[in-house]
């Protein structure tokens, strides 16, 4: 990964200017780089300025301070930018009378002449983009008849047709069902590898991001806002609500606890051991579990849902045993020893008040 | 893999339109043109129209006079106004991504009206009134000049504000506000004028295609021609704006500059038409929808000429209806366009079940 970066920021500070006032969204950010062939996930809680950062990097809104250098130069004109960065935004395009092919073809806008005529190579790039995004079946459809998932893929195809080294996506997985999210993330990962694009996407899908991202940019409050605290006042240069950014390989961020602190709330916690958020608060009852493999993993999940903490010293003990190709759960308490052949049966017995 | 058949030789957007649609529209245009030339208080048969049009001598002198001096200029004006209003409407609907936008949303039409009101209601100055009467209603240079001035003034204000505005929704609201300010000023003027002057002004607001001839027609042609040229050249920008401002920006469009170009073009078209013909409603809002329905595309390279054709045909038909053959009364064009046109559009939209918005 020694390739020259496609995009570098220098002392970037994002925010809004309206009238004479400046509203700071982020603190001065560390030097951010997007390299070819890398997939970067931009994570952060709601309102942490993910979109603002994305828009600033893409040149849709000016930075408050600092510069974004693309292809080694700062201050590119909008038509130069359009040949470097393509976007998939959250904006709806549903109302227009466009069909899918036309919409994808619009991606050639920065490369076509003043009349917008397409030549053979344009058409070839459009064809490949359609193929890559897998939307062959949708070409004749009107944009407003597409489902959210289809629409997202079509907008991705349009961005691919723009044929830029950098691709940025603002929450591309929002509104998608789980399989579509996974497919989209996998597709983006492939695109980064196979087409050697630098991809930056903002998302709330922590677990997916951990799996596909080469790098994670994590936006979080520099000094977390207290509940009920007023939002940052416009005009001030250094604000308690401004966001800071940490970056690194996703695994590093998990191991050094950055993830945990970023998403820590009163009632939600990130489990470093499993890489998922704990839905169930830690329970009061303790239990001992022996066994390994898939059955043990799912048993542990079931137990944590029921509010059990798994401890070595517990008096209640579950053994997972393989018997003639079938899994059996053996439950031993100081005064009982029983066997169950499903987790449901086991849980029912555990919740029986007569058990202990 | 399968590529849509339209991919063959399409422009940036949309399918190559079927040739027969263009052919059909052209035929309709010729029919409407002939109908418009025959219609009027004096009935001139089709056969004689051909003769009068294509040979320089012979035929009935009265008929020749009527066709050359009255009906042909009127038909030309209808063609120009039909093109200009339709294209202006198309541009506004795409710029503001709003199916209800029409050329008047920026207040240009109201500006022209204000100019006319200023002349006609100029404090009852007898000299002005006399001048208008002498030169003949809406055809007078003074009225036209004042309307141009009013439209240009409003356009300047709009352009100045447009440079400070970052998004098009704000621009739309500002345009509507300017529109109502201008109308309010005109109303104040009416309120303090005497009834006869107000009647003159009201007559002007009914619109008329008949008052433009000779040099005026030449000037109108130049203004509409340049407005249309700018509009056609901005087709690509309008295509990009279909996806909204953010996407347009990301594809390299300077939205502010595009907005200025589009507003200039629309203002030129609508301002000059209103100045010469008075306000003509309905076409600007309806024709783009009809064009989208007829060609089933969003590409402005197709929608522009399609709107021109459909707008022209509609205005010619409305004008023919306005002078119901054989009848002596002539209805004002602005009334006919709305009265006849609106139900037609409602019918067509209901039939397609699906409003093809912007």
Image (spheres, rainbow, N blue to C red):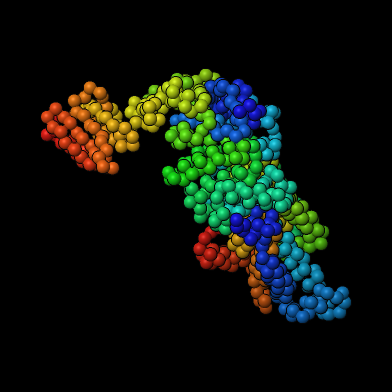
Q: Which residue is situated farthest in the front direction here? A: A324
Quadrant position of the C terminus of chain A in the picture: top left
Q: Position of residue A263 (x, y in %)?
A: 41, 27
Q: Is residue A324 left or right of residue B4?
A: left
Residue A311: in sight, yes or no? Answer: yes
Number of numbered callouts drawn = 0
Residue at position x 78%, y 79% from top?
B48
Residue at position x 60%, y 30% from top?
A34
Q: Position of residue B185 (x, y in %)?
A: 61, 46
Residue A224: in sight, yes or no? Answer: no
Residues B209 and A229: in front is A229
Q: Position of residue A60 (x, y in %)?
A: 61, 35
Residues A182 and B166: in front is A182
Residues A133 and B201: in front is A133
Q: Position of residue A292 (x, y in %)?
A: 31, 32
Q: Is residue A335 left or right of residue A161?
A: left
Residues A326 and B201: in front is A326
Quadrant position of the N terminus of chain A in the picture: top right
Residue at position x 68%, y 31% from top?
A71
Image height of B119 relative to A282, above or below: below
């Amino acid at each position: 990964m020694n390739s020259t970066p496609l995009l570098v920021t220098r002392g970037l500070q994002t925010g809004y200017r309206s009238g004479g006032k400046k509203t700071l969204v982020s603190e001065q950010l560390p030097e951010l780089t997007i390299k070819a062939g890398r997939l970067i996930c931009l994570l952060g809680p709601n309102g942490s300025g993910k979109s603002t950062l994305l828009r600033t990097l893409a040149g849709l809104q000016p930075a408050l301070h600092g510069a974004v250098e693309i292809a080694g130069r700062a201050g590119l004109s909008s038509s130069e930018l359009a040949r470097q960065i393509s976007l998939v935004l959250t904006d709806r395009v549903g109302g227009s009378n466009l069909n899918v092919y036309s919409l994808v073809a619009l991606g050639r806008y920065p490369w076509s002449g003043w009349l917008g005529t397409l030549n053979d190579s344009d058409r070839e790039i459009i064809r490949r983009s359609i193929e890559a995004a897998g939307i062959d079946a949708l070409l004749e459809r009107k944009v407003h008849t597409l489902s959210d998932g289809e629409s997202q893929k079509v907008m991705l195809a349009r961005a691919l047709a723009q044929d830029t080294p950098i691709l940025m996506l603002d929450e591309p997985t929002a509104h998608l069902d789980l399989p579509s999210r996974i497919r989209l993330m996998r597709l983006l990962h492939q695109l980064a590898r196979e087409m050697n694009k630098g991809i930056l996407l903002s998302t709330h899908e922590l677990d997916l991001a951990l799996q596909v991202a080469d790098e994670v940019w994590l936006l979080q409050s520099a000094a977390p806002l207290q509940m009920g605290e007023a939002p940052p006042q416009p005009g001030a240069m250094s604000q308690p609500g401004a966001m800071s950014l940490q970056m690194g390989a996703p695994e590093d961020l998990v191991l050094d606890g950055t993830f945990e602190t970023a998403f820590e709330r009163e009632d939600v916690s990130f489990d470093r051991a499993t890489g998922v958020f704990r839905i169930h608060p830690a329970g009061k009852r303790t239990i001992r579990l022996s066994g390994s493999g898939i059955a043990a993993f799912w048993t542990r999940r079931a137990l944590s849902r029921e509010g059990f903490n798994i401890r070595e010293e517990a008096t209640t003990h579950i053994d997972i045993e393989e018997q003639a190709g079938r899994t059996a759960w053996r439950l031993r308490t100081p005064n009982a020893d029983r066997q169950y052949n499903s987790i449901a049966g086991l849980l029912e017995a555990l919740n029986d008040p007569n058990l202990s | 893999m399968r590529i849509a058949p339209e991919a063959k030789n399409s422009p940036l957007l949309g399918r190559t339109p079927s040739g027969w649609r263009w052919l059909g529209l052209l035929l309709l245009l010729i029919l409407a043109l002939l109908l418009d030339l025959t219609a009027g208080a004096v009935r001139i048969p089709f056969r004689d129209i051909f003769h009068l049009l294509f040979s320089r001598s012979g035929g009935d002198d009265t008929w020749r006079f009527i066709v050359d001096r009255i009906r042909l200029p009127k038909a030309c004006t209808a063609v120009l106004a039909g093109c200009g209003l339709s294209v202006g409407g198309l541009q506004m609907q795409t710029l503001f991504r709003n199916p209800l936008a029409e050329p008047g949303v920026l207040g240009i039409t109201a500006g022209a009206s204000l100019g006319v009101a200023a002349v006609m209601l100029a404090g009852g100055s007898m000299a002005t009134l006399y001048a208008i009467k002498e030169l003949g209603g809406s055809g007078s240079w003074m009225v036209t000049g004042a309307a141009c001035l009013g439209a240009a003034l409003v356009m300047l204000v709009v352009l100045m504000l447009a440079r400070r505005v970052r998004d098009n929704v704000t621009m739309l609201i500002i345009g509507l506000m300017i529109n109502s300010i201008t109308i309010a000023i005109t109303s104040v003027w009416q309120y303090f004028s005497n009834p006869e002057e107000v009647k003159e002004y009201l007559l002007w607001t009914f619109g008329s295609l008949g008052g433009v001839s000779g040099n005026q027609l030449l000037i109108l042609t130049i203004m509409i021609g340049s407005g249309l040229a700018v509009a056609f050249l901005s087709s690509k920008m309008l295509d990009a704006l279909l996806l909204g401002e953010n996407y347009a920006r990301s594809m390299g469009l300077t939205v502010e500059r595009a907005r200025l170009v589009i507003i200039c073009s629309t203002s030129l078209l609508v301002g000059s038409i209103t100045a010469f013909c008075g306000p003509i409603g309905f076409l600007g809002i309806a024709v783009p929808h009809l064009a989208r329905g007829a060609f089933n595309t969003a590409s402005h390279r197709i929608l522009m000429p399609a709107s021109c054709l459909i707008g022209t045909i509609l205005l010619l038909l409305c004008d023919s209806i306005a002078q119901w053959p054989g009848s002596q009364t002539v209805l004002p064009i602005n009334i006919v366009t709305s009265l006849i046109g609106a139900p037609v559009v409602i019918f067509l939209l209901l039939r397609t079940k699906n409003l093809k918005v912007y």
